[in-house]
Image (cartoon, helix red, strand yellow):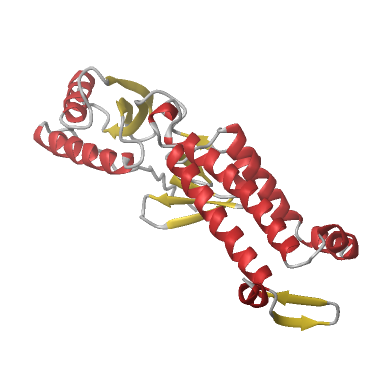
Amino acid sequence: MDTINNILAFELFHFKEHSLTVLELVTVFAIFLITKLVLWFVKKGLHLDKFHKLDEGSSFALYQLIKYMVWIVAIALMLEAVGVKLTLLLAGSAALLVGIGLGLQQTFNDILSGIILLFEHSVKVGDILEIDGDIVIIQEIGLRTSKGLNRWQIIVIIPNSLITTNKVINWSHQTQKTLFSIDVGVAYGSNVDLVIEVLEKSVLEHPEVHKNDFLEVRFVDFGASSLDFKVLFFSKNVFYIEKVKSEIRKFINRKFIENNITIPYPQMDFHLKSKIE
């Protein structure tokens, strides 16, 4: 027993009035292991059947909050274990902390925004967002930044303040089906009823659009060079809707060729006046 006590009391490091013993190092390591174990149980517990009312995003947000709080407590205990008094440390570095705070205002703003996102649940993991013209699926909401995957399969790191302070479209905060449109222009003199019929058949030919989901084709305007139509349809494939639109446009182009319907080029008339002397 004395041997164990001697080993635990052995000084590994000594500087002025401070020292690091084997016992303190073991305590720090034990706190680290206990923290990891607690977080593992919390993560597993959030996926139990009794938490079935929580969706994936809510479970992730709750776990993130618990993780941050547990690690703050754990780090405080580790510092206390090695003899670092937090009150003295904070008091002695007050001026430094003020300077750091002024230099890291944007970082603190991002962190505060992250806490708001985790509490408010206005954005959750799995949501499809439109930010600055880019469409992303949120994969992770962190304390300072969030991570999303865009349509080009590129990971996008998003500062949380960008989500909370800017205009952001959340395509997931609605029904499963979303309304989309395709604009089409045909030459003057075309049979309007035939054009509408062809457009309807072209949209319904796509497997992503069902008859019950299809809305209508509208004759919207007399354009400068064309008769303008708008095709309105519902689709569940929000993230890859541009691919769906591209395929529908191919169907439209093929059926226009089959039915001799022309998509006109922009036209401009020039009037030349000759000067008679």
**Residue at 52% over, 55% down:** 36
**Residue at 56% over, 33% down:** 122
- Residue 154: give x, y in percent of width and height: 40, 57
The answer to whether 212 is drawn above or below residue 127 in the figure is above
**Residue at 37% over, 26% down:** 222
Residue 127 visible, this orientation: no
17 or 175: nearer the viewer: 17
Residue, far left: 258
- Residue 188: give x, y in percent of width and height: 27, 29
12 or 120: nearer the viewer: 12
Q: How many marks?
A: 0
The answer to whether 209 is drawn above or below residue 81 in the figure is above
> Which quadrant of the rendered structure holds the N terminus?
bottom right
Residue 106 visible, this orientation: yes
- Residue 241: give x, y in percent of width and height: 32, 39
- Residue 182: give x, y in percent of width and height: 32, 33
Occupied quadrant, residue 249: top left
The answer to whether 148 is drawn above or below residue 92 in the figure is above
Occupied quadrant, residue 102: bottom right
Q: Is residue 55 left or right of residue 67?
A: left
Q: Is residue 195 left or right of residue 238?
A: left
**Residue at 67% over, 58% down:** 75
